[in-house]
Image (cartoon, helix red, strand yellow):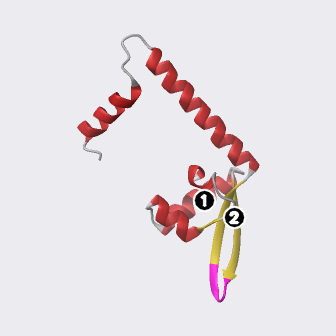
């Protein structure tokens, strides 16, 4: 959800649900968790007579996402440099194929 929101100012609930391919309760649960952590701002309103909910990352949320992505990059680099390591992309693709993932 954070990766989706990083490139936008505000994203509505339905768009988040559709792009992530998850259920309404899953979006609600994760948005509450992120909001409680201070990573997500939630705005509620209406368009016409229909209630709408929008989300955006807070500055804290953007910083946490960037920090997490940097950590993942460092981890990948460390794994790639380990003795006997193979390049991560081909290995990851092979592992996904073996697991039956597309």
Q: Which mark is residue 31?
A: 1
- Disc 2 marks which residue? 42
Residue sitting farthest toward the bottom: 49
Name the one closer to the observer, 100 or 26.
100
Q: Is residue 25 left or right of residue 92?
A: right
Asked whether residue 12 is drawn in magenta, I would say: no
Q: Is residue 49 magenta?
A: yes
In this view, 11 is above or below 34:
below
Quadrant containing the N terminus is bottom right
Q: Residue at x 45, y 66 (%)?
A: 23
Q: Is residue 37 above or below residue 79?
A: below
Which stretch appears magenta?
47-51
Q: Residue 102, image x and y in percent? A: 29, 47
Determine which quarter of the picture holds residue 73. Answer: top right
Residue depicted at x 73% and y 53%: 58
Percent coordinates x, y for residue 90 in the rendering: 34, 29
Tell me the CA gap for discs 1 and 2: 8 Å
Which of the 4 quarters of the picture holds residue 28? bottom right
> On the picture, is 86 further left or further right than 98?
right
Does the residue at mark 1 contact the one at mark 2 (Cβ under 8 Å)? Answer: yes
Q: Quadrant of residue 9?
A: bottom right
The local secondary structure at tag 2 comes to: strand
Q: Using the image, determine if residue 41 lies above or below residue 12.
A: above
Mark 1, Cα crowd under 10 Å, few <14 / some 14-19 / many 20+, is: many
Q: Is residue 11 left or right of residue 85?
A: right
């Amino acid at each position: 959800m954070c990766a989706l929101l990083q490139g936008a100012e505000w994203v509505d609930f339905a768009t988040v649900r559709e792009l992530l391919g998850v259920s309404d309760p899953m979006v609600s649960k994760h948005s509450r968790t992120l909001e409680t952590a201070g990573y997500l701002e939630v705005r509620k309103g209406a368009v016409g007579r229909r209630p709408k909910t929008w989300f955006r990352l807070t500055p804290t949320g953007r910083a946490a996402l960037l920090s997490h992505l940097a950590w993942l990059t460092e981890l990948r680099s460390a794994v790639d440099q380990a003795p006997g390591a193979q390049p991560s992309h081909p290995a990851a693709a092979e592992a996904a194929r073996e697991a039956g993932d597309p």
